[in-house]
Amino acid sequence: LESVVSLLGEGTGLSAKMMHLGLDIVEFIIAGVESSSTTNPSTHFDNPSMGDAMLRRFVDDMARQEPFLRSLIATMIAKNDSKISISPLYGTPLLLPLDPAEDTAINLLFRIASILCSDVSGVGKESFLHAFMLKDLRGAADSVSLASCVFLGILNEEVDGICVPQQNPTDRSFFLAVKLPMIRSVLLGALSSSLDECMASSDNVSRTHAERLIHNFHIPQLCLRFCGSKQVFQAAFDLYENVVLQLPTDVLADLLLADKSSLVALFDLVTGQNDTSAYNDYDGHSKQTFALTLGNLAKVGALSTAVERFGVRNNAIAALSAAMQGGSEENIIDENEDSLPRICVESLAAILRHKNKRDELEITALEARIMATAIGKILSSTVLNRFFTQASLETTFHTSVDHSSDRSAISQSPEARLLCSIVAFSETLGMLQSAGGLEAVGLIAHEGELVAIRAIQKACESNPKSIVDVDAHLSIMDALIQVEGKLSSLAADAVSDVGKLREVAATCIRTIAILTQNKETKLAVVSSEQSFGCLTASACIVSARAKVLSQKSEAIKKEVASVVEQGWSPINETLIDSVEGDASVSTGSGPNPTAENVNKNLQLGDLVIVDPNLPPSSN
């Protein structure tokens, strides 16, 4: 073996025929070493100590044959078709590309690496890594990273690949269960170290080389896939944490969200759920790291877009809900932006955000039930805890301090918006009532948040008594009373805010009307301290509206009188006086209106004029 390997390692003056013959001899010897190995289940060696001696001798011989190992590595790199070139630090390939024996050389490289890395003394693995990582050469990171990528790419084929045993089913099983994970771990470690060195280099060439490898060989996706294997998890996670996470978020988004499988794998890694047993010893740091990736993707809007594109909304909801629930020991989402539950709730809110109304969430009844079951309690507890803490702070500080912005921040938090969206469905009302969800939404409604007030109205329509039981009716009444003060403090050009406050008032009045028409809840409303304030607010609204209508009615009558003078006749002044909205009238100037153009433009609130000279219309 030593003579043949030494001759092949020199690689000079050998014909192709001699090269092939030398590789055949090495393959024959390796087969004998493999059959003598006590770790191989297909071994039937009668003398284990002799087998160990053969293995020891082989490891010692190969440790002295670095040129041969590097020639095999150079041959493997020559098979690379990524068009990424490097300095020939591994030496000259044994065979020219497309030579039929090229696959034999790569197969031998894998088998030699397996034998060396399985050496219990560690000497064999150290020898292989010294040769593979070019430890005796400086500035070799570019070459090592490419060699690692090419080798990992070759090992991706687990059925008919170059390195897969094809003859013996037992050997194939041993390859998949032991050899393949072992070599992958070694290569991932080498790749992590070399890419990290390239990315940290002051040389732009090395950084560009690393970025090309990451893109061309799909390193982020590879990490996520290998993190699903218990044997390879640690090496894959180290590569992910040390290299992949250092990429800019937009670049990471393009790579990780390029296909559905990677996104689903990321969701599974956040929850620690996978078909393999890779998560028996799953640690919180790893889970939080993957969750942080989701959070960063959500912040730039890439996560919600990918979820919609691949149709994995259910996966996202289930994964983030499970991770949020499992990541909170006290069943409360803390305000630390790097905590797992906080990242999950913000990512979930980003995924469920309404397409057109960015400050609202859009969920289905089924999704509401799923989230009510999984995270209803933690959302309710979090919102209640934050409000109670805020109330305690307000009693501590001077009463002149305005805390409305702090309460508003709680009401507009992702957990508050999620809870309000879930409560809005009658199917979830019973689930959340016992968890304090309805009470929490009532506190949000007290701050005048329209989404919470709508949720209370929905709950009131199905079960009015449940609203009174948690004093949410008082929050609705307070919200109505506060509308006038908020309107007076708005800037003159805040048209959208005015419209929102009007809707708040209207929704509050509808809810109060439902409660006062129910025998079980009427007394609670009319006997509350807020009842007089609600009457005053309602009276103000009615008075203001009556004034507007009166002014419009006078204007309409004047315009009608002007029209009559020109020969037109109004339909019915009583009807005109009762019409709401802006009045529009034809002054008779220009051509007379026809049935066609009148019907096309007619809207509720328009003043209708009838020409007595026109024949009756069938419309």
Image: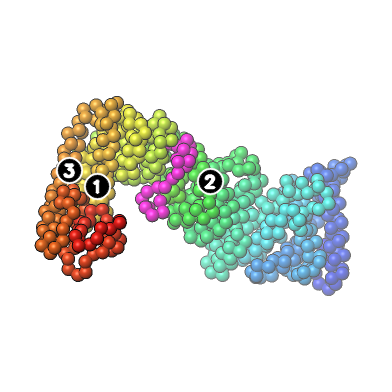
Q: Which mark is residue 315?
A: 2
Badge 3: how crowded within 10 Å, few (<14), some, or many (20+)? Answer: few
Specify the amino acid type for callout 2. Asn
Q: Please, which residue is most extreme toward the right here?
A: 46
Identify the mark nearer the N-term, 3 or 2. Answer: 2
Identify the mark nearer the N-term, 2 or 1. Answer: 2
- Mark 3–mark 2 distance (CA, rounded to whole Å): 49 Å
The picture quadrant where one finds residue 274 is top right
Within the magenta stretch, is there residue 374? yes
Would residue 223 be found to the left or right of residue 309 on screen?
right
* 272 relative to 137, above or below: above
Magenta range is 354-379
* In front of the other: 74 or 67: 74
Specify the amino acid type for callout 1. Arg
Residue at the spot x=18%, y=49% of the render? 575
Residue 250 rendering spot, x and y as whole percentages: 48, 60
Q: Please, which residue is most extreme toward the bottom here?
A: 13
* In front of the other: 298 or 476: 476
- Residue to which mark 1 is pinned: 502
- Residue to which mark 3 is pinned: 542
Residue 557 rendering spot, x and y as whole percentages: 12, 55
Residue at the spot x=10%, y=62% of the render? 565
